[in-house]
Amino acid sequence: MLTSPFIRFDLFVTDARHDGTMAGVAFTRQVGNLPAEVTSFVGRRHEMAAVKQLMSTSRLVTLTGVGGVGKTRLALRVAVERHRAFDAVWLVDLTELNDPSLISQTVAAVVGLRDQPACSPTDALGEFFGSQRALLVLDNCEHLIDSCAVLTDALLRAAPTLQILATSRQSLRISGESIVMILPLCVPDPDSPMTEGYEPCEAVDLFAQRAAAVLPGFVIDEHSHDTVIRLCRRLDGLPLAIELAAVRLRAFSLGDIVRQLDDRFRWLTGGSRASLPRQRTLHALVDWSYQLLTPGERTLWERISLFPGHFDLDAVESVCAYGDIEPRDVVDLLDDLVDKSLLLREERDGRVRYRMLETLRQFCHDKLGGPDERRTLSRRHRDWYGRLAERAAADWFGPEQAAWFARLKLEHSNIRAALDFCLREPGEAESGLRMAIALQRPFWLANSFYDEGRQWLDRLLRALADPTAPRAQGLYMNARLAIMQGDTAAALPMLRESLTLAKQINDPHSLAFATGLSGMALLFEGHPEKAAPLLRDALERHTARGDQIGITMASIFLGLTLHELGDNDGADALCEECLARSMDLGESWYCAWALTWLALDLWTRGQTTRAASLARESLRRSRRYDDRPNIALNVELLAWSATLDGDHERGARLLGAAKTIAGTMVVSGLQTKSHIQQHDRCTAMLLHSLGDTAFTKAHERGSRLTLPRAVEDALRERASTSVQEPERERTPSPLTRRESEIAELIAKGMSNKDIAATLVIAQRTAEAHVEHILTKLGFSSRTQIAVWFTTQTTVEQE
C-alpha cells in the first residue's frame, strides 16, 4: 500500500516557562513517513490479529523475536492498516544509531522538530505528541535497549494519546508493556512424512513468491514440493533466510541450494543492495545479536549449541555450568537469552523446554572452543543423559512409567547425540552400550523404535567385543528388538551367544533373560512345545532373583505358549497373575500386553464379549505409549468383534486400519497360529458377506485412517452390544477365588476400606483387586460388579 507524500505544516506552540516568560517550540507537522511496500506481505494473520488486539488495550506493544524473523515488516504492515486511527504514524529506524544519548534527537529529527535551546528534546517530543493522536514505530531497539526504555516511558507519561509500537530482540521491560513474540514462519512438521499431500504454509508460500520474482514462471509442483519443504525446514522458517535462498535461484537449482545449506552462512549472501549490511547475509545478522551479549551470555549460548534439539533447565545446569558459569547463574542467563530472542521457550507435555533455531545453533557451534572444550561438553552431555536413562530404567516398572515414557520421548535427539559421541570418542563404547541397554524398555520398546535400537546396539556391540556383562545384556536386548520385528533368524544367533557368554562369566541376569527370549523366539516361529520348557526355566530363574520385570515378561509369554498348547486354564492363570502384579505396582505397559493375550485366549474359547472388553482396556492403555504393535493387535481383535456383531463394513475397515498401524514393524511376527487362523476366518466371513468390491473399499478406507481416528473407531461400541447388563450365560467365572470374595462383598455394599478390614489385607491391595475385577469384566463401576455377581449367582442356582 502506498502512503501519502509528506505534508508539512509550520506550527508555533507557546509554553510558559517557570520564570513566567514564554518559550516557543517550532516544528514541522507531517502525517507520517511510512514507506511503501515493494514486495508482497505473506502470512502472519494470527500475529496481526494479536498485535491489533493488544493495541486496543495497551499503549506500548513490543514485537520481539530473533533477527530476520520479520518484526519490522509486521510492524509496518500493522501501522499501515491502522493508520486511519491516528493523526500521524511515524517510523523511526534506530539500526544505524550507536550513541544512546542521541535517541531523542533522532526521533525529533524524524517527526520534524527543530532543535530548541529552551527545552530538552525529550520534553519537546512529549509536547509534540501530546498535541495529536499519534503512533510511533520504534524499530530495532535491541542495541539501545536501556535508552529506548527511558525515552518510551517518558513519552507515554507526557503524551496520553500517544501509542508506541516497538520492535526489538528483547523487551523494553517497562510498566504497561505488552509483548508479542514473533516466531519463524510455520513449516510442515519435521516428524510428518514428506509424501503427504501439499498443505499451504507460510514459509513455503514466501519462498514461492520470492522465487517467482527472481525466476519468472517458477511454481511449486509435485517434483519440487518436497525439496522446497526440506529447504524451509533447514532454514527454520526464517523469512530473511528464505528470501536469501530464493535469490540464489538466479544461478542454482533447488537441489544445489539444499545441498549447500550445511555452510549456510557462506552461501546465503547477496540480499538487496538497499538493505543494511547486517541484513545482507545471515552471518552478519546473527553476529549483530552476538555482539550485544555479555560475556556470560555468550559463553552459555555457545555451550547450549551442543544440544541438537530442545532441552530443559536441569540439562543446561548439569551440562553447561562449569568453569566461569556457576549453576546458580544459569536461570538468569537463560532468562536473558530468551528475552533477547536467542532461545525459544516452549511447553511440551507440561514441561518447559528451550530450543535454539538451527541457524543460530550453527553460528554458536562455530564459535565454541577447540577440540578439548567440545569433548568436555560432549562428555558432560553424555553423562547427563546416561544418568537419565538409568533412572528411567530403574523406575520403569512402577507408577512413574508414563512420566518416564513422555520424558524420554522428548529427549530423542539428545539421546542420539549422546550415543553418537560414545561411538566417535575412543574408550567410550562401553558407556554407550550401558546407556543403550538402560534405554531398551523405556525407550526402544515403549516407542516401538525397534530398527533404530537395533542399529545403535549393532554398532556398539561391534565396538565392544570383550566378554563382559554389558555385552551379554546388549546381545539379548538386541535380540528382543529383532523378535518384535519378526526377525527371529537374526535373534536366535544373538541369544545363543548371550547364553554362552552369560554362563562363561556367571551372569545370572543375562542367563535368565536370554533363556526366556529364546523361548519367545521359538513361540513366534511356531514351536510352542519347544518354547514352554525354556520359558518355565526363565520364570524360575527370575523368581529366584526377585526380578519383577523378568517374572512378568516370562509369565506373559509362557501364558501365551500354554494357550497355543491348549492349556487355557494355565494360560489364564499366568496372565491374571501378571495383571495383578502390574496393578499392584502401578505399571501399565506390561499390563496392556497381558490384557491383550488374555483377550485373545478368551476369544478363542468363545467368551467374545469379555474378550472385546479386555481388548478395549488394553487399547486405552497402549495408546498412552503409542505402542503400535499392541494397538494393532487390539484393533484387529475389535475388528473380529464388529464382524461377529454383524457390523461388517466396520469390521473390514478396522482390519485395514490394523494392517496400516502395524506398518513396517512386521507385527505379523507377533501373531500366533491361533491368531492367524482367526484373522483368516474373519476375512473369509467379511468377503462372503460384503463381496470382494465392498470389502476392498472398506479395507482401504480403514488403511487411510490416522492412528487417533482408527483407535477412536475401534473403541466405539454399538448400542446393542455395550455393557448395560451382564450376559446371562452359563460360563465359568473369570474371577479368581479371592476376586469372587471381593465381588461378593461389593455386592453387599462394602467400601474398599471395609473389604480390607474384613479380609485382613491392605486397602491398596483391595483397591488393586477391585480394579482388576473391573478390567476383567469390562465394567466401569462397582454397581455393575454387584449386578453381575447377583446375576451370576442366580444363573448358577437355576
Image (tube, rainbow, N blue to C red):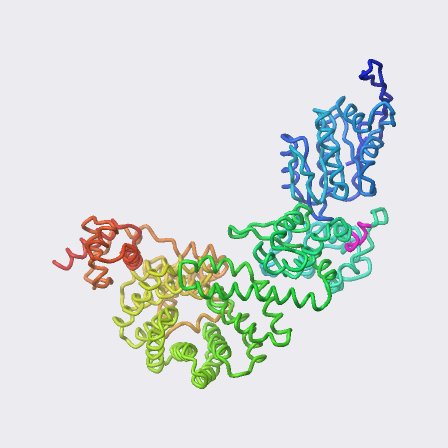
Residue 778 to residue 678: above or below: above
The residue drawn where x is 52% and y is 72% is 434
Is 277 part of what is drawn in magenta?
no
Query: In the rendered image, which quarter is residue 370 located in?
Result: bottom right
How far across and how far down the image is residue 130, in percent?
Answer: 75, 23
Quadrant where the N terminus sits is top right
Horizontal side of 230 relative to 608 (left or right) equals: right
Residue 225 appearing in the image: no
Closest to the observer: 718 or 21?
21
How far across and how far down the image is residue 485, in percent?
Answer: 48, 73
Horizontal side of 84 relative to 685 (left or right) equals: right
Residue 485 to residue 91: above or below: below
Quadrant where the C terminus sits is bottom left
Closest to the observer: 149 or 18?
18
The majority secondary structure of the magenta stretch comes to helix
Residue 635 to residue 345: above or below: below
Query: In the rendered image, which quarter is residue 503 located in?
Result: bottom left
Closest to the observer: 510 or 374?
374
How far across and how far down the image is residue 669, in percent?
Answer: 44, 74
Q: Hey, which residue is sitting farthest left in the picture?
A: 798
Q: Which residues are magenta?
A: 278-285
Residue 668 appearing in the image: yes
How far across and how far down the image is residue 340, in percent?
Answer: 69, 47
The residue drawn where x is 30% and y is 56% is 764
Query: In the rendered image, which quarter is residue 533 located in?
Result: bottom left
